[in-house]
Amino acid sequence: MARGWFLRRRPAGVPEASDFELRDLPQTPLAAEMVRVRNRWLSVDPYVRGRMNDTSRGPNPEMDGPAVGIVIESMAPKLPVGALVRHRLGWRDEAVGAAATFEPLSDLGLPEILFLGPLGSSGMTGYFGLLEVAKIKAGDRLFVSSAAGAVGSVVVQVARDRGAHVIASAGGAEKCRFLKEIGADVVIDRLAPGSMTDKLREAAPEGIDAFFDNVGGDHLEAAINAARLNARFALCGMIARYNDEAPLLLSDPMRIISARIRIQGFAVGDFAGRKAEFETDMAAMLKRGAVVAKDTLFEGLEAMPEAFIGLFTGHNAGKAIVQV
Amino acid sequence: MARGWFLRRRPAGVPEASDFELRDLPQTPLAAEMVRVRNRWLSVDPYVRGRMNDTSRGPNPEMDGPAVGIVIESMAPKLPVGALVRHRLGWRDEAVGAAATFEPLSDLGLPEILFLGPLGSSGMTGYFGLLEVAKIKAGDRLFVSSAAGAVGSVVVQVARDRGAHVIASAGGAEKCRFLKEIGADVVIDRLAPGSMTDKLREAAPEGIDAFFDNVGGDHLEAAINAARLNARFALCGMIARYNDEAPLLLSDPMRIISARIRIQGFAVGDFAGRKAEFETDMAAMLKRGAVVAKDTLFEGLEAMPEAFIGLFTGHNAGKAIVQV
């Protein structure tokens, strides 16, 4: 029998395992144009935390998120049994829905798990945020926050491939070693003593030309304080905010004007029309080893809440993926 | 004998009249390529407050700022006696210097005082900030802070001329009447009770597409809270900061990402190469009455500190200018 995760109660702050409940799913027969998919890989994403605050779907909504699976039953001629697909009905072992909501994987000659990582939305987020929002170019000094995460680890590698000098932050010695492995030039441990402003000043004494931000809070403030003339900031996420409602404090906001900083919020959906271009370029970088997928793998559907909570407690490096 | 203003002591917070001292200036003979200019109009600008904190010019520097005057003695063939010029040696009645530091006024068939207002740096700041940074277009909902000031009053009028819907803030009933006179659609009195976020929400229930900011602080926070998708913010000044070092607080910084806000600091110098284009367009708007210069005029060099302090105590509407 198929099973899926539901929200048992709405968490305040960092979620706990007991906030989730694994339930049996009713067996849904297929109507015309529907397919049944056996999920193989489930993506573990911080954006889901925001959705958990959304009360419009009742008190105990079914959890969901990106997943890759294989069609095991089909009433849709365009999506036959055996097709590999990516979709949004993760957090469960079997997905049933209209064929149009399942996206066949492009034939790039690369393993299917990459379609949840560098070839998935975290890769596409990092790629377009870096190239189109932060407008990185060779010689730029780039600061990447939460750089050991799914998006950040792609940003570090693509930036290095484009010839940028990369200053990367993460929490703890293990993740900092990981950042060196994937090519960061200078590493900042956010858990080390001292303010982020002081630590960034030491790591980038000449300042920064670009900032790819997954954190907000003290990282954003430090980047403003370190910005060189015409610096470009791509704001992608604010991990510091997901579980904390304290206001953002900027000690020297006039620097936005004096350094002519451009701060731009974005999301991967802004570039939805450019998937083919992205996949071609990213597949090439993967094949020549310029980008290497770095995953924290979990085993079995039961591990989903643990993998998710690890996003906020700093236990995952790279992209977190559950193998069903 | 020529006279000029000096800084007597470095102010903390809002300057006072006793921070300034009027002194006789030594009679400087002209060397080759130098001119002597009788100042007619002195510009009164908030940016000078920032320069007063600069300790690199000693404890009692000579004050300066934009001015318009007429050449009364010349050792430079290119700048004969009688030429009208704009320059940076204001806060005094007579300016002496190399001819190259004086800029002849363009022949636009408009009164010379306009070259310190709509045709001067405050006009050029508003013009390029609005059109090139905030990228205003017909139908946009624009919020302008400190809209009764020299820059703001130009922004309101140019935005209306371009077909935007203008929400404008200023302090006090008199300035709010002034904003209505120059064409603002909706006016916010920043001194009225309630938070700026609440007042802006009421003034712009559908949100804003663009923000031209002279204030920072609670105005910037309110604009972030009211921003529609892809809103563009042009940060020009932070009056709230010039005399106050409290950090900027943003209660909901995630909106920068969710609303895809683009926040861009700029200064008029970024557009220095585009003066001719600006003057042509602004002169046309002045001639057809789309932009009307609104000045607070002061009489005599002695009035300079009073006029300057009025920038921070909210006593001036439009551009403050001293007639020598």
Image (spheres, coloured by chain):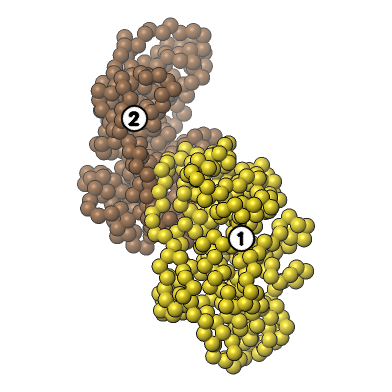
Chain colours: A yellow, B brown
Above/below status of B126 relative to A30: above
- Which residue in the protein does label 1 denote? A317
- Which residue in the protein does label 2 denote? B44
Q: How many marks?
A: 2
Give percent across and percent down for residue A171.
55, 54
Give percent across and percent down for residue A104.
68, 76
Secondary structure type for disc 1: loop
Q: Judge whether residue A131 can be spotted in this image.
A: no
Residue at x-position 29% and y-position 46%: B170
> A184 or B286: which is nearer to us?
A184
Which amino acid, mark 2? Val
Which amino acid, mark 1? Ala
Secondary structure type for disc 2: loop
Above/below status of B131 relative to B254: above
Q: Judge whether residue A323 can be spotted in this image.
A: yes
Give percent across and percent down for residue B286.
39, 39
Spatial CA span between label 1 and label 2: 56 Å
Residue at x-position 42% and y-position 41%: A252
Residue at x-position 33% and y-position 38%: B244
Q: Which mark is residue A232?
A: none
Residue at x-position 64% and y-position 86%: A35
> B255 or A114: which is nearer to us?
A114
Give percent across and percent down for residue A18.
46, 75
Above/below status of A100 relative to B69: below
Could you tell me which quadrant the C terminus of chain B lies in? top left
> A185 or A230: which is nearer to us?
A185
Chain letter of the residue carrying label 2: B
Chain letter of the residue carrying label 1: A
Left or right: residue B202 versus residue A232 is left
**Badge 1 local density, few (<14 within 10 Å), some, or many (20+)?**
many
